Amino acid sequence: MKKPLKLALIVLGSFLGLLLLIALVAPPIVKSYVLEHDKELVGRELGIHRLRINPLTGGVRIKELTLFEEDGEHPFLNISDFRTRIGLFGLLRNKVKVKRASFSGLKVNIEQNHDWFNYTSLREYHASDDTNTVDEPSKYEILLNNIQFDQSQLRYADLAVGSEFMLNNISLKIPSINLSSMRTDVGLDLHLGDSTVLHTQVLLTQNASEYIMKLQVDRLGLEVLEPYVKQSYQVDSLKGWADLDLQIKGNADHLLDCDVKGNIIAHNISMKDPQGNPLASIDTVVADIKRFNLTENYLDLKKLHLSGVQANYTIGPDKVANLDLVMLPDTDTLASTDTLETDEKAPLSLIIEDLCLDHANIVYQDQSLAQPFNYEISDVVVTSKNLRLDGNNTVELQASLNQVGKLNAVWKGNLSDLENQDLALNLSNVKFSDFSPYSVQFFGYPLEHGTLSFNSHNVIAQGQLNGVNKLHIASPELGEKVKGVEPRMAKVPLKTGLYMLTDKQQQLRLDVPVKGNLNDPEFSYMDAVMTVLGNLVVKVATSPFRRLASDGDQQYLGFELTQRDFSAAEYSQLDDIAATLLEKPELEIFFEQRVDHEKTIQELSDLLLKRDYFLSTHPGMEQQTLDLLTNEAIGSIKWNDKGLCAFAEQCGEKNKVRSKKDVASVALAVYGKQAEDLLMMLLQHKNEQLRSYLTERKGLEPERVTVNLPDKESMKEYHKESRYEIRLNIITE
């Protein structure tokens, strides 16, 4: 062998031996160095099971590479098999070229607790100490080619809410990245659970801080949002799935400060209350996001369409609504300021350029009533253009009521100013009997028949409600009073009032004004309406006659007991009563005679005393028929008349009256018993006269007119002028 060739072989052999020695010796040395200085290099402990280096090809292979959490025990990141190959000759030209980088079995564990992440310390460790320092351009050009992730997994857990989900079967391929310019397209495909597929593309800009991400998710299960919903609401479950097609533009240094646009389509969303009963569901939600920025608290939707909404609002027997059960108490939802600090955010700015809700159905149930109330509002359509939180809005609503009725409403107002609102409402072809449970609850009577229409306009200004409500009911009918129920307005004569309010064509028309302060915790719109209706019914039922006097809600006909006949004014009032009863043949009337016993007996005793005094001064009149109670001469005698006083004193001495000089005392003592008999005779005469006039002269059926004599006890408790108190009732067979 020639000497030069022999020398070349020796050099080559020595070089190969050196490379072999490096391949054998370098991995343990590198591995040992890395494990001893891991915290200096990366800020945390590392674990390496096996390291191989091929100096000929520039290949490196690591088995079971682990980056631990801060505790040094639990893995934050683990790679089952990492392989890379670096072009060695490129180093001579200041070019680092990674020909291949393969990650197999990558597992990443990310945990969050409010603003803390388990990778926060890594970011802080590698952050520059001087934010004003400008990095000098690297003299090396770094190229990464053929980067691939297979069979990888990402776990995310939100410790604050107890949420956890896994990203499985992550597949990521990156053809190339130029780290000098950071311009690249990254494509990521992964599976979340058994059905969700996610695809992303990330475009990094020149300075590597700004990025544009395209995110596409198919069949994302909404169960992952359930823990976050439970932070604010007590729900049993949240189901459904969604498709997302979004573009996210932001800065890697401020991850939450990004703009999002794109489309979200959700399907078959359902939520159950804490008892597992259906609360609400939506067939489809379509949201076209024009711009969303979480940091700015800004959301602009070009379109929000909801279809197939099903909602249940139920008030239980304990008067607690299912929505009240869903809402968490304030003490549970508000964190202590000592343990949690939150940054002040700008108020939410919400714009919905095109809002539409259709094919919605709402079931309202009130089980707190004596008779449960069930009502269905179906075919609901809600539309609005340019709806926003901080501006004036107009929302239109249409719906069917229990399949036959119609609802139309227009709301104008500002969502951020609830003390100034305007609502116009129109109901038509509503079945009166549908609201029978509330009629029983408030008045004790069921609603059996009638068709209702209702026009309402309610304006709220500075928290003060001023409402105008026009009610029209055709052919209203009530059933018999329900036994065993104590109605809230038991004293309201609903049946009589309803009958009185209905005209000859069986039409009832009412104006029901409602006023109140919405800031008053005792104010209830339903109670306000019922109170107005109740008062109106009472007034109509007890005050149906225009020319009669009234004492509060009680109408009455006054009369002079000592007059043998009614006056012209009293006859006129009786004519008004008769006309009303003739027009309403189903009504019967009750006259309750009321007299102040003590006062009347004194008056009659006084008259009897004057009569006897008058007769004593007119001897020729003893045997004549004398109308004692209407004789003007007798009535005109004064109490200070000397003859009367002397006559009274003589009567007092004769009847042994102590106060002989007190004319009134003498009259009561001497003529009191006679006055008692005269009183009953006069009352009976007045009653017969009243009954005869209404039945014989005016033609009312006798069975429809009842005139009751007062008993002695009631007369002793009554201390007003003599009168007939009037009560009406509907004749029932």
Image (cartoon, grey):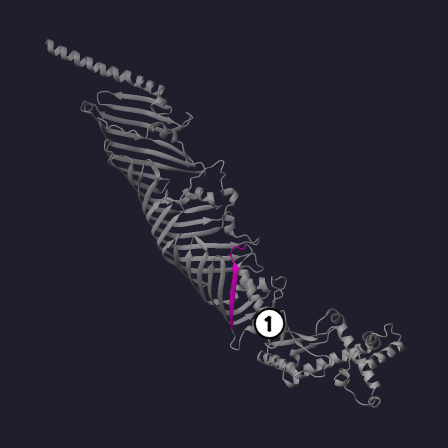
Q: Residue furthest left?
A: 2
Q: Find disc 1 in the rendering and name its residue.
A: 541
Vertical side of 581 occupied by 1: above or below:
above
Q: Main secondary structure of the magenta part?
A: strand
Q: Quadrant of the N terminus?
A: top left
Label 1 residue SS: helix
Q: Quadrant of the C terminus?
A: bottom right
Mark count: 1
Question: Is residue 515 found inside the magenta-colored segment of the image?
Answer: yes
User: Which one is in front, 12 or 411?
Assistant: 411
User: Which one is in front, 665 or 72?
Assistant: 665
Extent of the magenta region: 508-520
Residue at the (58%, 59%) spot, across then down: 370
Residue at the (13%, 10%) spot, across then down: 6
Q: Is residue 55 left or right of residue 507?
A: left
x, y percent for residue 600: 75, 75
Q: Amino acid at mark 1?
A: Ala
Q: Quadrant of residue 125?
A: top left
Q: Quadrant of residue 37?
A: top left
Residue at the (55%, 59%) spot, across then down: 372
x, y percent for residue 63: 32, 25
Q: Is residue 310 left or right of residue 512?
A: left
For disc 1, the neighbor class at 10 Å (few under 14, some 14 to 19, many from 20) is many
x, y percent for residue 322: 51, 51
Question: Is residue 546 found inside the magenta-colored segment of the image?
Answer: no
Q: Is residue 105 left or right of residue 337?
A: left
Residue at the (87%, 74%) spot, across then down: 657
Whether residue 627 is visible to the viewer of this picture, yes or no, is: yes
